[in-house]
Amino acid sequence: MSIGTNEVNSFGTELPEFSESEKPDSRLPLPQPVASIAKSTVPLELPPLLGQPDEGVSRRVGWWAAVPSWFVSMVLHVGVILILAAWNIEPIKRELKLMLVSSESLNDGEALEEFATDEAMASELESSETEDTASASPVVDSTIAEAQVEMNFGDVVATNMPAVQMTSMTQSLIPKSGLSAQANAAMRAALSSRSKETKRDLLSKYGGTSDTEKAVSMALKWLAAHQDPNTGAWSLTHSIVCNGQCDHAGKRRFSQNAATGLALMCFLGAGQTHLEGEYKQTVFKGLGFLIKNMKFQKGLGSWYVGGGGQGYDDMYAHGIASIAMCEAFGMTKDPALLEAAQNGVNFLAYAQNPSTGGWHYAPQGLGDTSVVGWQMMALKSAAMSGLSVDLNVVRKANSFLDQMSWGDYGSFYHYDHRRVKENTGYNSSTTACAVLCRMYSGLPKDHPSIKIAVERFSNDGPSPTNTYYNYYATQVMKQVGGPEWEKWNVRMRDKLVASQEKSGHMAGSWYWADVHGADPGGRLYITCMATMMLEVYYRYMPLYGDKAEEDAFAL
């Protein structure tokens, strides 16, 4: 059946009301407390200072009493210097961060508070001592690229942050020890595909061309030009930045967390960070906006503002912003991003419905597959970035997908419980979204349910009007690879390259009559989705390489 706008909407259009019996219970219990990274340091235990020993001490340490005092002082000082030097070695610092202590969870009824931006923490970003070099050929158009600047998150990171809550990786994580250096390194390697050398190889291997990279370059230039220069945010109503020079502005003007997260995902997907690349300041300002705009309380950090249908940032926005923040941290390991990234992930556990395992427009709603997709991608980005992920949250989310599945081997997926009850039939958007979630949860590509879904995607091909379906199906098909991907890629790639605006103020952007996002998201939403589809060749490393690589990705 065709997919109407009332089935899936990326921007939280309100669904028909549930009956009282179907509504989530606002009094449902909150998640159990999780552990947190230790904020304190390890005390140094030094030998006591030596003075003039009495006769008893002299008899016990006769030879030591004869040692000159200058030699004792030198030994002590050298020891302290070596310990302090070791303290600053990054691998040791990372291991120390894994020490867990107990922490409080959000109490029932307590609200999240906004960051106090006037209470700044003196925290500087790491910056490269060398000049930025151009991206891998073909080079990103740097016409509007900014000069290198000294960047400091000191004025956007709050000092009175609660301890970052960290959950322990359980033995059910694949590989067995999720906290092992080997496992974490393998997960983080997923983001290394965006490096210049790897990107070049993957472009050639998976069907990218100089034309696709030129299109990405033009898109980043357009996005940078439509960032609010004062706040660092993007708006789905992008015309407020360019004074109406671009048409088809979205109507969700106040969904700035979602718009900023989507735009940042495009830059990060191309290997552009606040520390490296042609758009350092653009990315820096965007990340700074998200940190300033976060609400927090006791280890939970939220970009949620209001429920669907009101035009404000809902749980879609939280998932999207979390993906961007986690990826930025994973790519740079900048400690200034750690608290926002981990607290955003922690909020996912709080916002998940404890009964269904789903996420909906508002925290602890019954859930829908579309919103679930963004939250699960955020969890995956967190795992790949070395952050802590509660596997019980992932298990419950997969339980929700079980409830939505239907057809042979559970190959297709409904949008929500009402559609399950009504048996509304095939939904391409939610099926593509759910299949990708299953793949990122470790389901092998030769599983019958994935093979059936992939056959359906291949036969249908990319949709001319359903960007949401194309976005998820493109990632599924690329991970599957083979003839199915080659067939899909040619159609998707060539259509996007040909349909991009080539001249004038709108050059680098896309717009078409999309069934889901055209009205609320407008040109900026479609441009971001199209850009990420053209970054698919190198955005993440392949899931299904050798066995070790497959295991490293599985949650």
Image: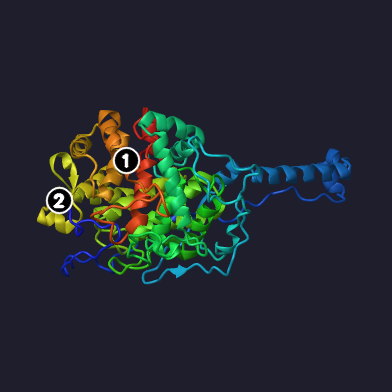
Q: In this view, does 225 lie above or below 304?
A: above
x and y, in percent, of residue 413 in the image: 19, 48
Residue that extends furthest to the left in the rendered view of this protein: 422
Image-based side of 446 in relation to 240, left or right: left
Give whichever of 144, 58 is nearer the camera. Answer: 144
Q: Residue at x 35, y 43 (%)?
A: 533
- Give the residue number, with chain letter if any, for mark 2: 2
Image-based side of 277 in relation to 295, left or right: right
Going by the numbered disc 2, the residue's amino acid type is Ser
Which quadrant holds residue 108? bottom left
Q: How crowded is mark 1: few (under 14 residues within 10 Å), some or many (20 or more)?
A: many
x and y, in percent, of residue 148 in the image: 61, 50
| Type of colouring | rainbow
x and y, in percent, of residue 250 in the image: 33, 62
Give the mark nearer the N terminus: 2 vs 1. 2
Q: Is residue 106 above or below residue 425?
A: below
Going by the numbered disc 1, the residue's amino acid type is Gln
Q: Residues within 10 Å of mark 2 (few under 14, many from 20)?
A: few
Which quadrant holds residue 132? top right
Kindly state the secondary structure of the residue where label 2 is placed.
loop
- Give the residue number, with chain letter if any, for mark 1: 475
x and y, in percent, of residue 2 in the image: 15, 51
Which quadrant holds residue 455? top left
- Do we see residue 165 in this rendering? no
Task: Give the total number of marks visible in the rendering.
Answer: 2
How far apart marks 2 and 1 lie (CA) works out to: 22 Å
Disc nearest the viewer among 2 and 1: 2
